[in-house]
Amino acid sequence: MANFITFIRLILLFVLVLSIYWADPSWQRANLPLLIFIMLLDALDGWVARKFNESSLFGAVFDIAADRIVETVLWVVLAHIGLVPIWAAIVFIVRGNLVDTIRNSMAASQGVAPFDMMKSPLGRFVVGGRFMRGFYNTAKIVTFGWVLMIQPMPVVYPDHWADISAVSGIVTMSLVWLSVILCLVRGAPVVLEFLAIPKARK
């Protein structure tokens, strides 16, 4: 059931993408609630896995893969239509591929879930800790949500948009920078522990 919820989340992601590109601006006002629902499903699949004892290595890897797909697709799409800078999307793609390759290969070889592979207390807190994961996910949700909320405003609320357009750009870039910094901070322990492995074996 948990993996099915994760799959549904991916289907809804592409519904969201279709809306971002082709829906009438008045319908695009529903993009924010749809995004929130997609993110709630992310929490739900983990709860279901724990509640019904469905936790597995495959489920953990599939969930992380779905998270990365949602994240990457939204960054690329929003950059493509000019609502966020393209460099932010590039940072997330490079960091995501690098960290996930390291984390998933090491987790598979050790037979543990990817978030459980960190050895140092700092690494466990930054990468797998509930607070940091929640803070990072909240930052991304707020960033995506804000951008999706303002997307239809120039057409749907032109007078209001004229009053807030300058401030909205500042808010957007502040949220983008926060998300990027958290992305890099949470990826650094994975890379550092991976680089330290050969030394530990000597």
Image: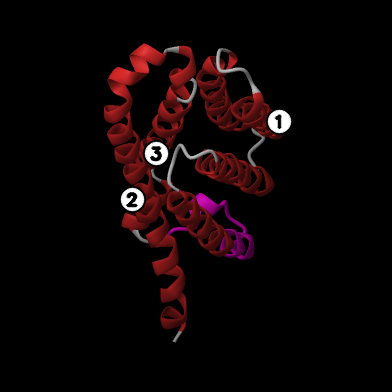
Q: Is residue 199 visible?
A: yes
**Relative to 154, is 112 above or below?**
below
- Assess disc 2: are there few (<14), some (14-19) or many (≥20) residues with their C-alpha within 10 Å of its C-alpha: some
Q: Amino acid at mark 1?
A: Ile
- Assess disc 1: are there few (<14), some (14-19) or many (≥20) residues with their C-alpha within 10 Å of its C-alpha: few
* Distance from Cα at disc 1 to Cα at disc 3: 26 Å
Report how many numbered discs are placed on residues in the image: 3
Asked whether, in this view, residue 70 is left or right of residue 123, the answer is right
Prevailing secondary structure of the magenta residues? helix
Q: Which residue is mark 1?
A: 11
Task: Pinpoint residue 160: horizontal percent, then vertical percent.
Answer: 34, 13
Asked whether, in this view, residue 37 is left or right of residue 133, the answer is right
Q: Residue sitting at 44 percent across and 54 percent down?
A: 87
Task: Pinpoint residue 144: horizontal percent, then vertical percent.
Answer: 46, 32
Q: Secondary structure at mark 2?
A: helix
The range drawn in magenta is 104-118
Q: Secondary structure at mark 1?
A: helix
The numbered disc on residue 98 is none
Q: Which residue is mark 2?
A: 181
* Distance from Cα at disc 2 to Cα at disc 3: 18 Å
The numbered disc on residue 130 is 3
